[in-house]
Amino acid sequence: MGNPMKIRAAAKDGVTEVKVLISHEMETGQRKDANGAVIPAWFITELVAKHGDKVVLQSEFGTAVSKNPYLAFKFKGGAKGDKVSVSWKDNKGDSRTDEAVVN
Amino acid sequence: MNNQRRNVLKSGTGAAVLGALAAAGIIKPGVALADWNKAAFEAKSMADTLKALGAGAPVESKDVQVTGPDIAENGAVVPVGVASSIAGTTMVAILVEKNPNALAASFTLPEGTEANVQTRVKMGQTSNVYALVKAGGKFYMATKEIKVTLGGCGG
């Protein structure tokens, strides 16, 4: 399930800015461990952000996204008290959804 | 070792086939993007990545911006932002030319979401970073060189 994401959403002048910090290894599959064995790739492939039921961002990650990915974006609309949720899915089939309240 | 070679061979042909299909119009790029775009993310070169994204030859545009440091001390965490002021931007992607796989991330933007996304990417070495933007069915791009100092190469 992974650790909880940190999500901040702030509405200002009709635009909501969302910042997300995800806890994930984002292993590239190119590194080797001390014994020379390749560490298998383990990374987030898809991420969807929603404002209420409306999708506001859909993204696909490759292995080049940094460990513990950070993401910031803005969408029009959103008011204090609205809910913003972020879900991700990784290449091992793990997934997680967290939500935050816009302030 | 042998296994790795097979994987490279496999993904290489996969990307080529998908690219060919997209070029022939059998599968629309939009359809290919519906699920995680394996071909695009596993493509090795810029040209193959662009092909897998259905981008062909994007036009360089001043309305697209890549933001990031001029010099990144730590290649594992390089803050990169992409912004586009082209109306009707529906997709933005971040590509690092000299990474083993050029495509780092792609974002599909529904109406109402601003074409301004920031994230952090890994860079193996000093490289050009490309922002690829899709607006109104056309592709635009912008470039910025980011020097990576970790590893002692000094750029």
Image (cartoon, grey):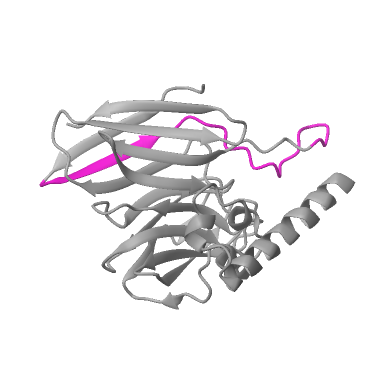
Does A22 sit left or right of B97 as displayed?
left
Foreground of the two, A43 or A55: A55
Does B113 sit left or right of B105 as displayed?
left
Foreground of the two, B14 or A26: B14
Quarter of the image for the C terminus of chain B: give it. bottom right
Task: State the residue at coordinates (53%, 53%).
Answer: B104
Does A84 sit left or right of B74 as displayed?
left
Relative to A72, does residue B116 appear above or below in the rendering?
A: below
Does B145 sit left or right of B68 as displayed?
right
Task: State the residue at coordinates (67%, 38%).
Answer: A41
Residue A62 locus on image (x, y percent)? 56, 48
Q: Quadrant of residue B22?
A: bottom right
Whether residue B1 can be seen here = no
Please provide the residue range marked out in magenta: A13-37
Does B20 lie within the magenta span? no
Residue B81 locus on image (x, y percent)? 38, 55
Task: State the residue at coordinates (69%, 41%).
Answer: A29
